[in-house]
C-alpha cells in the first residue's frame, strides 16, 4: 500500500544505466540533495536493459536510459523508444553533432592507438590513420578486442560512413590479418599486451589508459601504461574517431520533467567536472578542465566532427556483418 | 493407483506448467523467417559455437570427474593427515562462482597482474610477462568452471560412498581384489548413479554458464543465443541455437535416467548398516593423498579468496563505498523465500510420484526439472516475453489493467524465475533421498495402519532430513551466486553481491568487484560450514 501511494505522489526519476561507476551514483545523490528528486537506478548491460524496456512497453517505469556509445543510443532511438529529450538549456550547452532530437551526449571519449615507442618509430606514425592499419606492414603487430564489442562496431560503422561498405570489408580483412593474436580481453588488456611486448599497436579508448596511469588500479598497471604512448590517428584528414556517453528520455517515461532536470543537472559545470575527474572522459560542454592525465595525452588533437555519430547506430549491423565475414572473432 | 486426477496430479501439473513457460515461449515463435544474421553466422562462427560448447563440456566433465571422485574416494575410505579437515573444506569450492573464479584467474595471471607484481617485488624489475602462463579464453573458462563446480560430483559421490555398506568393501577383499581393482570394479560402479547425477548437474551448469564464458570472450551456444535474441532481436535464430543446446541436455537426461535405472541401489534392509573400517595410509601414500586434496583445496578455494582479499586490502576505498548490510538483506531475503517454496513443492511432487506411481506424473516431473537446462539469461528474457504476451493477449482482453509491474522488476518475478531455474536442484535432491527409502518401508507403514500423510510426516520427512539440509545449502549457495536472472529482473535500487561484483567487472573495475566477491564467498562459506558440520555428524 505504501509503495502504491509513493508511486502516485513520488518525486522521483527512474534511470536505466549501463554506466556502473560509483561516481555516477554519488552524482545522483547530489542531484537529490539539490532538487529533492529521488533517483532510482537499475544498472546492467545494454542489451538486457533495452530488452526489458522494450518488453515492458508502455508500462515501463523507466524515465531515462543512460549508456556508453552512440551506437547503443542511436539504435535504440531508431526503434522509436525515446521521446524528445531537448530543452533550451540542453540545446545551448551541447554541440549539435553530439545530440539528436531524442538523445544527448553527456561525456566524450576517443578511440585511439597506443603504441610501443621501442618498436614503433615516429616515421611509422607519420600521418597514420585507422585506414592504414590494414597495411601488411603491421602484420602480426596489432591487438584489438572482439567484434561483439560496441566500441569496435562504432569505429567500423564510422569507417563505413566515410569509405563505404566494400572498402571497409577489405580493411577489416586486412586488420584481422595483422592481428598478433585472436581478439580477447577488454581495452585495457590490449594496452597491457603492447606493454608486455605481445603486440606493437593497441586500439583502445582514451580513459582506460588514463585510469591505468592514475595508479587507481595499482602500481603494476601504472608501470605498464608508462611503457606505451597514445597516438591520435587521422590528424591530416577528418580527425580521430570520437564517441560518447549519453542518454535519452524514454517514450513512456512517467516522470519526464524530472528526467529533463536530471539531464540538465548532468550538463552543469559542477557535474561535468565530477564526471570527468572520476572517469577520465572529456567534458561535453565548454569551459571544463580535463583531468591532468588527459591533458598530458594532448588536447590539441583534431576530433572527427565530420562523421555523423548517428551513423554509428545506422551502420551497426553492417559493421558487425563485415567483421564477422572477415573472421574477426 | 492409476492415473487418477488428484491433489498430487494437480500440483505436479502446476509445477511443470510453470517451468514449461520459458520452453513454450521459446518454441512458440519457431515459425518466423530466418534472418541474414543466421546465414552469416552459419558461414562463420556457428561451428565455433558448437565446438566451443563441446570442448568446454568435455574439459569440465573430465576435470570435475577426476577431482570430484578422487577427493571423495580418498576422504571416504582412507585416513591421512588433515582428512577430517578436507572432508568439509573441499565443499567450500561451492562458495566461489565461476565468474568470480574467472576474475581471479585473470587478475593473477594477466600481463602486469599479481604474479608479475610478486616477481617484480621479489627479483626487481624485469619483463616477466612472457614467462607467465595465461589462463584465458577456452582454457580459462574450463578451469574456472571446473573448480567452481567439481563440488557437485564430490558431495554426491561422497554421500554415496558414505552409505556404501561395509559388505561391498569386504566383497572386494574376499574376492582377493587389489585396492585398484576394488575401486574400479566394485566401489566406482556402485556409486555410479551419484557420480552421473553430479556430472549431469555439472554439465547443465556448464552449458548454461554465461558469466565466465562471456568474461573470457568464448563464444558458446549460450552466448550465441544471448546475442541472437537480445542484440539482434532474432528469435528464430535464438530458438535454433536453443534447440541445439536442448539436444545436448536431453542426451544428458537420458544418460542420467538410464544409469539410475540400471543401478537400483536401495540400501539393503537386510544385513544392517555397518560402519566402514577406514584404511590408514602410511608413508608416501599418505603424503600423496594429502597433497592431492590440499592442491585441490588450494586451487579451488584459497586461490580466489586470497586474490580477492589482496585486492580488497590494497583498494580499501571500494569496500568503504559498499552498502554491505543492504546487499546482505537483499540476498538473504531472496534465499529464504525461494528455498522455502522450492523445497515444499519438491516434496509434494516427489511424494505424489511415489504414492501414485503414475507414468504421466513421471513425465510431468521430467518436464518440471528442465528449467535447469535453460540458461538463466534465456529464462529471464523468456519470462519477460511471456508476461508481455499474457498482458497484451489475455489480461487486456478482460480490461484488467497491466500485470507487468507485478512480475517484471519485482521480488515476485525474481522468485518465480528462480523457481523455474532451481526446481530441478530441489527436486533431484529430494528424489535421490527418496530413492534410498525402500518401498518396503512404505508398505510396512501402511500395514501398520499409517495413513499416507502420516507415512509422509513420520517416516519420509525424518528420513530425508539429510537431503533437505543438503538441498537447502545447494539452493542457498546457488541463489547467492545467481547472476543473469537477478541482473535482468531485479527491482530499482536492488543489488546483490553477485550483481554488484558483475557490474564492476564488466566496467573493467575488477579491483572494485573484489569486495562484493569476497563478501559473497564468505557468506556462502558460512552456509556451507554450518551445514557441513551437520552432514559430517551423520
Image: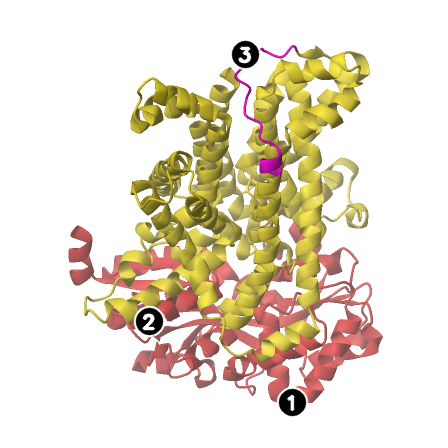
Chain colours: A red, B yellow
- The image position of residue B292, as x and y in percent, is 72, 26
Q: Label 1, label 2: how many angstroms apart (C-alpha)?
A: 36 Å
Residue B276 belongs to magenta span: yes
1 or 2: tag closer to the N-terminus? 2
Which residue, as the protein is rendered here, is positioned at the far front? B2
- The image position of residue B406, as x and y in percent, is 27, 57
Q: Which residue is mark 1?
A: A164
Left or right? Give the position of B69 relative to A5: right
Disc 1, disc 2: CB below 8 Å? no
Label 1 marks a residue whose chain is A
Q: Are marks 3 and 1 on the same chain?
A: no
Part of the protein shown in magenta? B259-277
Label 2 marks a residue whose chain is A
Q: Nearer the viewer, residue A112 or A1?
A: A1
Label 3 marks a residue whose chain is B
Image height of A174 relative to B326, above or below = below
| Category of crowding for the residue at label 3, using alpha-carbon neighbours closer than 10 angstroms: few (below 14), some (14–19), many (at least 20) | few
| Category of crowding for the residue at label 2, using alpha-carbon neighbours closer than 10 angstroms: few (below 14), some (14–19), many (at least 20) | some
Image height of A28 relative to A323, above or below = above
Point out the image quarter for the N terminus of chain B: top left
Q: Which residue is mark 2?
A: A57
Question: Which type of secondary structure does the marked residue at label 2 adopt?
Answer: helix
Any part of residue A191 in sight: no
Q: Which mark is residue B272?
A: 3
Amino acid at each position: 500500500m505504501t509503495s502504491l501511494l509513493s508511486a502516485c505522489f513520488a518525486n522521483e526519476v527512474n534511470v536505466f544505466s549501463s554506466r556502473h561507476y560509483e561516481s555516477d551514483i554519488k552524482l545522483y545523490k547530489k542531484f537529490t540533495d539539490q532538487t529533492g528528486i529521488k533517483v532510482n537506478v537499475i544498472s546492467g548491460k545494454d542489451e538486457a536493459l533495452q530488452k526489458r524496456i522494450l518488453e515492458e512497453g508502455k508500462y515501463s517505469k523507466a524515465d531515462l536510459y543512460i549508456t556508453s556509445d552512440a551506437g547503443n543510443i542511436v539504435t535504440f532511438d531508431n526503434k522509436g523508444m525515446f521521446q524528445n529529450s531537448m530543452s533550451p538549456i540542453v540545446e545551448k550547452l551541447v554541440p549539435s553533432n553530439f545530440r539528436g532530437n531524442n538523445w544527448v551526449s553527456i561525456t566524450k571519449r576517443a578511440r585511439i592507438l597506443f603504441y610501443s615507442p621501442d618498436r614503433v618509430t615516429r616515421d611509422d606514425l607519420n600521418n597514420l590513420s585507422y585506414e592504414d592499419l590494414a597495411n601488411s606492414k603491421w602484420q602480426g603487430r596489432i591487438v584489438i578486442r572482439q567484434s561483439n564489442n560496441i566500441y569496435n562496431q562504432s569505429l567500423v560503422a564510422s569507417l563505413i560512413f566515410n569509405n563505404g561498405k566494400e572498402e571497409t570489408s577489405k580493411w577489416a580483412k586486412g586488420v584481422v590479418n595483422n592481428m598478433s593474436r585472436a581478439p580477447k580481453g577488454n581495452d585495457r588488456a590490449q594496452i597491457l599486451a603492447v606493454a608486455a611486448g605481445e603486440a606493437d599497436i593497441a586500439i583502445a579508448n582514451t580513459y582506460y589508459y588514463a585510469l591505468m596511469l592514475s595508479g587507481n588500479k595499482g602500481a603494476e598497471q601504472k608501470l605498464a601504461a608508462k611503457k606505451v604512448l597514445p597516438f591520435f590517428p587521422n590528424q591530416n584528414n577528418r580527425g580521430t574517431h570520437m564517441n560518447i556517453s549519453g542518454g535519452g528520455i524514454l517514450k513512456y517515461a512517467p516522470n519526464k520533467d524530472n528526467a529533463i532536470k536530471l539531464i540538465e543537472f548532468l550538463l552543469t559545470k559542477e557535474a561535468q567536472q565530477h564526471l570527468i575527474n572520476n572517469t577520465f572522459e572529456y567534458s561535453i560542454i565548454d569551459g571544463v578542465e580535463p583531468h591532468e592525465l588527459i591533458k598530458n595525452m594532448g588536447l590539441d588533437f583534431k576530433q572527427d566532427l565530420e562523421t555523423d555519430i548517428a551513423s554509428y547506430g545506422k551502420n551497426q549491423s553492417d559493421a558487425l556483418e563485415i567483421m564477422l565475414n572477415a573472421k574477426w572473432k | 493407483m492409476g492415473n487418477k486426477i488428484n491433489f498430487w496430479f494437480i500440483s505436479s501439473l502446476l509445477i511443470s506448467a510453470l517451468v514449461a513457460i520459458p520452453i513454450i515461449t521459446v518454441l512458440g515463435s519457431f515459425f518466423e523467417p530466418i534472418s541474414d544474421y543466421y546465414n552469416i553466422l552459419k558461414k562463420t562462427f556457428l561451428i565455433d559455437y558448437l565446438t566451443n560448447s563441446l570442448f568446454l563440456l568435455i574439459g569440465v566433465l573430465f576435470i570435475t570427474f577426476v577431482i570430484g571422485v578422487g577427493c571423495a574416494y580418498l576422504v571416504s575410505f582412507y585416513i591421512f593427515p588433515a582428512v577430517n579437515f578436507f572432508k568439509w573444506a573441499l565443499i567450500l569450492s561451492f562458495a566461489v562462482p565461476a565468474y568470480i573464479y574467472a576474475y581471479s584467474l585473470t587478475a593473477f595471471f594477466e600481463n602486469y597482474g599479481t604474479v608479475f607484481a610478486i616477481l617484480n617485488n621479489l627479483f626487481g624489475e624485469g619483463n616477466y610477462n612472457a614467462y607467465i602462463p595465461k589462463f584465458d579464453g577456452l582454457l580459462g573458462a574450463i578451469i574456472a568452471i571446473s573448480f567452481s563446480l567439481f563440488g557437485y560430483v564430490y558431495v554426491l559421490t561422497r554421500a554415496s560412498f558414505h552409505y556404501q555398506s561395509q559388505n561391498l568393501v569386504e566383497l572386494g577383499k574376499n574376492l582377493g581384489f587389489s585396492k585398484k581393482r576394488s575401486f574400479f570394479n566394485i566401489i566406482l560402479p556402485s556409486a555410479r548413479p551419484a557420480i552421473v547425477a553430479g556430472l549431469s548437474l555439472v554439465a547443465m551448469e556448464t552449458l548454461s554458464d554465461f558469466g565466465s564464458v562471456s568474461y573470457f570472450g568464448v563464444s558458446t551456444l549460450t552466448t550465441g543465443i544471448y546475442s541472437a535474441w537480445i542484440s539482434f532481436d532474432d528469435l528464430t535464430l535464438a530458438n535454433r541455437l536453443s534447440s541445439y543446446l536442448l539436444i545436448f541436455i536431453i542426451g544428458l537426461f537420458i544418460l542420467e535416467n538410464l544409469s539410475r535405472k540400471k543401478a537400483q541401489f536401495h540400501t539393503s534392509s537386510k544385513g544392517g548398516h555397518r560402519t566402514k573400517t577406514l584404511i590408514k595410509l602410511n608413508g608416501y601414500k599418505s603424503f600423496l593423498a594429502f597433497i592431492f586434496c590440499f592442491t585441490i583445496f588450494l586451487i579451488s578455494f584459497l586461490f580466489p579468496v586470497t586474490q580477492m582479499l589482496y585486492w580488497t586490502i590494497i583498494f580499501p576505498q571500494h569496500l568503504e563505498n559498499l552498502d554491505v548490510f543492504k546487499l546482505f538483506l537483499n540476498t538473504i531475503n531472496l534465499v529464504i523465500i525461494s528455498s522455502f517454496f522450492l523445497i515444499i513443492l519438491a516434496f509434494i511432487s516427489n511424494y505424489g510420484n511415489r504414492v501414485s506411481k503414475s507414468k504421466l506424473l513421471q513425465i510431468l516431473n521430467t518436464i518440471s526439472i528442465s528449467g535447469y537446462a535453460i540458461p538463466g539469461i534465456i529464462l529471464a528474457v523468456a519470462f519477460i516475453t511471456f508476461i508481455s504476451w499474457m498482458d497484451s493477449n489475455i489480461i487486456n482482453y478482460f480490461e484488467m489493467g497491466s500485470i507487468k509491474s507485478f512480475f517484471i522488476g519485482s521480488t515476485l518475478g525474481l522468485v518465480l524465475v528462480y523457481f523455474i531455474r532451481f526446481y530441478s536442484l530441489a527436486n533431484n535432491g529430494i528424489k535421490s533421498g527418496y530413492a534410498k527409502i525402500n518401498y518396503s518401508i512404505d508398505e510396512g507403514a501402511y500395514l501398520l495402519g499409517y495413513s499416507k500423510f502420516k507415512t509422509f510426516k513420520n517416516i519420509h520427512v525424518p528420513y530425508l532430513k539429510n537431503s533437505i539440509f543438503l538441498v537447502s545449502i545447494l539452493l542457498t549457495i546457488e541463489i547467492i551466486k545467481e547472476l543473469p536472472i537477478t541482473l535482468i529482473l531485479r527491482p530499482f535500487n536492488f543489488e546483490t553481491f553477485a550483481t554488484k561484483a558483475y557490474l564492476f567487472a564488466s566496467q573493467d573495475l575488477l579491483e572494485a568487484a573484489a569486495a562484493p566477491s569476497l563478501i559473497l564467498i564468505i557468506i556462502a562459506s558460512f552456509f556451507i560450514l554450518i551445514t557441513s558440520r551437520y552432514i559430517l555428524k551423520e
